[in-house]
Image (cartoon, helix red, strand yellow):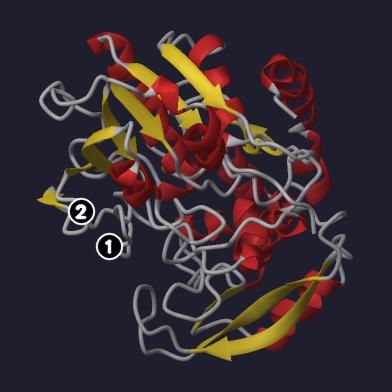
Amino acid sequence: MNKIALGIEILLSDRAQLLSGARTGLICHPASIDHDFRHSADLLNQHKDINLTALFGPQHGIRGETQDNMIEWEGFRDARTGVMAYSLYGEVRKPTAQMLSDADVIVFDVQDVGTRVYTFIYTMALAMQSAKELGKRFVVCDRPNPIGGVGIEGNTLETGHESFVGMYPIPMRHGMTVGELARMFNEEFGIGCDLEVIPMQGYKREFWFDDTDARWVLPSPNIPVLETAVVYPGMVMVEGTKFSEGRGTTRPFEITGAPYADSYELAEHLNRQSLPGVHFRPHSFKPTFQKHVAQLCHGVQLHVTDREVFKPVITGIALIKAMHDLYPEGFKWQTPPYEYVYDRLPFDVIAGTTKLREQIESGASLEDIAASWQAGEKDFAERRQRYLLY
């Protein structure tokens, strides 16, 4: 285990002058903690040289108030700090001039999970846009990419498929920290705000989260453990189908199934494909909420046996393709809306393209699907290089 210093810790110990004399707004969530499990809102509020005047919460809230997609929360006065807290998840996802009227600088300290389809990085991007438009400074306190900063996998989001789970042309697994993404969003994609990134100390991009001494707190209700984040870049796509992605179980995104599936048939079919670093175990379960609630579902649990060679995106596609091919009468794509998109299939919103669904429907091989990503992966690896901090 390697000792690191988080961006928020460096900000408070060495760079607090960035906030001195400024009214400070903070974007945070339950995983915004230091090594002693102290929440960033409390740390800023207690700091003698910092004037915390506003809090902003992404999806699921500042302290974990909400559970699910498109379940909104209202603004309130935070009981611990006495500071007004505003929601950035709902019909209003971009901070308004009124919300920012009491802030001169916005601090972003949010733990991401390393997948394009995650709203937190777009909350950051939209807040950066507001900072540019309203003349506010923007400070990003960097945190680890929990699934490492080396692997890049998946198709690049296509123009015309932008959404709150994909605003910019990046692959599904991007291998960047939030600080690095902020630099890329700001320069490559033209936001152009007054940006300061506080890098971590002691961090190397090949680190997984548990290679560091940082404390894991679930960044959202359905990413309870690091293993969930490891499979999420592929398994999130199951949300675009009528199959359960394991919400309502204790291992969401690692468990998947449906009432009409055959656990052993599905597991055997997938294991025959010899996908690297993963084993599929037959598993039956009853979700306590969401899809197929209280119904007995049959499917698999993914067991990642070697995360260094595991390919989460093509593994997720292999699973969806197996569902599609084995259970043609039961398999269906999920219907809109999805994350405030009402006119596109949720799977296409997640994929950032229609091509991936069309490849599955037309019977394209896994090899051909993965090969179709290679040019985009190579291009992104080159484009991201100038924005890397580690």
Disc 2 to disc 1: CB gap under 8 Å: yes
Q: Secondary structure at mark 1?
A: loop
Residue in the image at 16% along x and 59% along y: 79
| In this rendering, position of residue 243 left or right of residue 199 | left
Crowding around mark 2 (Cα neighbors within 10 Å: few <14, some 14 to 19, many 20+) is some
Establish if 367 lies above or below 335.
above
The residue sitting at the front extreme is 48
Horizontal and vertical percent position of residue 57:
29, 46
| In this rendering, position of residue 311 left or right of residue 100 | right
Question: Which residue matches tag 2?
Answer: 72
* Quarter of the rendering occupied by the C terminus: top right
Q: Secondary structure at mark 2?
A: loop
Q: Nearer the viewer, residue 243 or 176?
A: 176
Going by the numbered disc 1, the residue's amino acid type is Thr
Q: Nearer the viewer, residue 15 or 139?
A: 15
Q: CA distance from mark 2 to mark 1?
A: 7 Å
Crowding around mark 1 (Cα neighbors within 10 Å: few <14, some 14 to 19, many 20+) is some
Question: Which residue matches tag 1?
Answer: 66
